[in-house]
Amino acid sequence: MARIALTARFRLAITPNALRSYLAEFISTFFFVFAVVGSMMSSRKLMPDAASDPANLVVVAITNAFALASAVYISASASGGHVNPAVTFAMAVGGHISVPVALVYWICQMVASVMACLLLRVTVVGQHIPTYAITEEMTGFGASVLEGVLTFALVYTVYAAGDPRQGALGAMGPLAIGLMAGANVLATGPFSGGSMNPACAFGSAVIAGSFKNQAVYWVGPLIGAAVAGLLYDNVVFPSQASDSLTGISDGITVV
């Protein structure tokens, strides 16, 4: 029985609907990372001392808000608009998508991020791809906790935006998610970069060739995302939790 169940899960992961969701996730993640990393590069181009210029923080925060809201909106009906391995992890832990689907989502998200950063590196000659880094005043543990809290807030917003009990939010759902991401960047950008997205941190690290403190942008966000999803489903809004974020029948989540 276990072997049959496992086979069925893998078959569901290669249905036409599932394949479309993978492509949608790739496209949305690609353009999100392209916009976010591109905004960092643009700020460095326009501001010689971008690291200490408050305007740089505002630019990156606004880009995160606009890009994430748009990326979630354009892929929500096909893939759920995760655009983030941490969101996918929370959905898998909560049972909203199957593990095989979640793994393919991760692959699509990370490949999209690498390709977006590679495109920026190839086309913008003379500039290095910026990577996420923690400030000297913080330890790796502290930065992980900070990123975990940020991702908790983001994923909790994702769950609320996709809950039909909140009413028909339409485009307001993705907008709320984007605004939370932008607010988090404004609050913590100078300390940890406000990544909240392991794929974005991974793609820029691969192309830049620097994996320093990379674990910070995986451990914290994944734990924070899982806690947010479990808390939302089982404590804050436990009733009808199994139906609150379930999409089409093959297990793909729709936000």
Image (tube, helix red, strand yellow):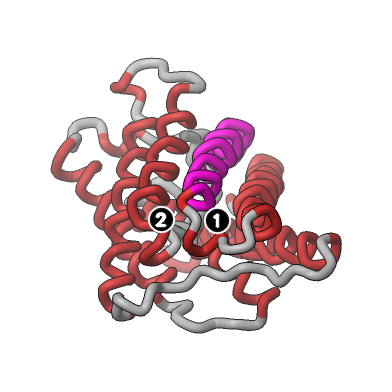
Is residue 33 something that shows in the picture? no
Label 2 sits on what residue type?
Ala
| Neighbourhood count class around disc 2 (C-alpha, 10 Å): few under 14, some 14–19, many 20 upward | many
Circles 2 and 1: CB atoms closer than 8 Å: yes
**Most prominent secondary structure in the magenta stretch?**
helix
Q: CA distance from mark 2 to mark 1?
A: 9 Å
Write down the region rendered in magenta: 55-80
Report the residue that reaches farthest toward the front. 48
- Nearer-N-terminus badge (2/1): 2
- Is residue 66 on the magenta stretch? yes
Residue at figure coordinates x 74%, y 63% from the top left: 115
- Residue 9 in the image: above or below residue 210: above
The x, y position of residue 9, in whole percent, is 52, 56
Under tag 1, what secondary structure?
A: helix
Residue at figure coordinates x 30%, y 47% from the top left: 153
The x, y position of residue 236, in whole percent, is 16, 38
- Residue 149 in the image: above or below residue 61: below
Label 1 sits on what residue type?
Val
Report the residue that reaches farthest toward the top. 168
- The residue that disc 2 covers is 92
Residue at figure coordinates x 34%, y 38% from the top left: 157
The x, y position of residue 7, in whole percent, is 55, 62
- Residue 237 in the image: above or below residue 190: above
- Residue 240 in the image: above or below residue 59: above
Image side of residue 207 versus residue 171, left or right: right
Answer with the quarter of the image where residue 167 lies.
Answer: top left
- The residue that disc 1 covers is 101
Answer with the quarter of the image where residue 137 lies.
Answer: bottom left
